[in-house]
Amino acid sequence: MRLVLQLVARLLLIVALCLGAATVWATFDAYRSVDRATAASAQRVAQALQGLYWHEFLLRSSRTSEHLLPVPEWRTLETMKLISPGVCVEFQPTTAFEKPLCGQSEGLGKTPPHWFASIVPTFLGSHAEVVRPVSPRAAAAGTIVATPDEAAAISLAWEYILNVIDVALLMAAAIALLASLAIAHALAPARTIVTALQRMARGHYRTKLPRFRSMELAMIGGAVEKLGTRLEEATEQRAALTRRLIEIRDDERRALARELHDEFGQNLSAILAFADTIEMAGAKGTKDNGIAQDARMISQATHHLMASLRDALKRLRNPLPEELGLEASLVNLVDSWRSQSATQPTIQLDLRGDLTNISGPAATTAYRVAQECLTNALRHSSAREISLRIERRTGEDDALLIHVEDDGGGDATRVAQSAGFGLTGIRERVAAAGGSLSILPANRGLSIAATIPLAA
């Protein structure tokens, strides 16, 4: 999950928890607000009747105090105004057939569901009636008893919950939207950093990052730039060392080729001449052909050694691209393998693009990669068909692609992990040229692909 979505989801979880806590608090407060309204109604009605009591007491002092109330009639519209909705007030001692005076409860809150009406009294308890004396100094004046309506209390609590939920849902939606925009804006530089890291993974190490306002992101961006600089320096140093190593190796190969040609070639030629002389002398001097046969065996072995030496000299001498060019050298390489034996597998050469102006280390690297891949496919597999494709890609990514595929089976993973001199040399040359090498399984064999940049 994306980081923005994770942060928004956590924020919504916090909002949901706060919403639950607010709902519980609103339920408790709304349910108990009826108790407060009941006490306030009882107090207001008691104070009003207390004024009425003392007024009647002063005007009708000849009457006994216990008959002052409820004469004159206290059940008036002014008294009704003092009673909160959902509360019933009763004067004691009551007269016959007198009913409590109740505030308006119709329309007070919304009708709650049955489960809510049964759960709330269970957890929050019931409401108690409130008793207030009409006059603390005259006990005979009577008392006011206020009783709350439990159904009205539950309806009021349910309406509070609905109001809180509506407001909270609107706030949650607004918070989610605004938080998503704020978080996305704050994390937008992370995409730039990821893009820079992806470019570094593709070999573009020097990637300039913009200046970030956040201190943490600025530190990460600085670390990425330093890492890219160090990787580029290390890559350049490794490529330079590899090129130098290849140059030293090529010099040693040329020196070794000269030594083999000068020493072994001349000595093998001399041995061949001596063997021919011995063979001719043995054939003329005696009927026993044993000496002649030995001479012929020496001659055959010498011819074999000279052929092996010529092959070694071909591989050790200066690469053909320096003499013939890349295209002609590749054609010569394929033709030489084709001409060695009619039983060799079919080699298909596919040249694409303009290869005429490719020279120098890039041409030599491409030739050596093709040469080594063909050698491995011919000598170490039972391939019947080998495909060699050389493609020149122009434009911004000016590069040379070498692709060799065979149908001789083989384990791509094992070959890729091989530490043989041939593959090691290919890896070193391609790395020195700043390219890439991949060894993958094909339909019936192996596929080796190398990319050699030409822009450098």
Image (spheres, rainbow, N blue to C red):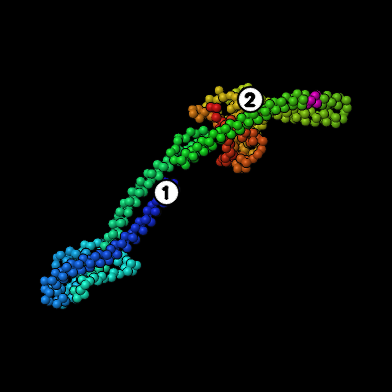
Q: Residue at x 21, y 72 (%)?
A: 137
Q: Amino acid at mark 1?
A: Leu
Occupied quadrant, residue 404? top right
Residue at numbered disc 1: 7
Tell me the chief SS of the magenta region: helix
Which secondary structure, mark 1? helix
Q: Residue at x 35, y 56 (%)?
A: 19
Residue at numbered disc 2: 320
Occupied quadrant, residue 74? bottom left
- Magenta stretch: residue 190 in it? no
Count residues near mark 1 (Cα–Cα under 10 Å), then give few for <14, some for 14-19, many for 20+.
some
* Alpha carbon distance from label 2 to label 1: 62 Å
Percent x, y of residue 215: 46, 40
Decide if residue 93 is on the left or right side of residue 166: left
Q: Which residues are magenta?
A: 267-273
Residue 53 higher or lower than 29, as above or below: below
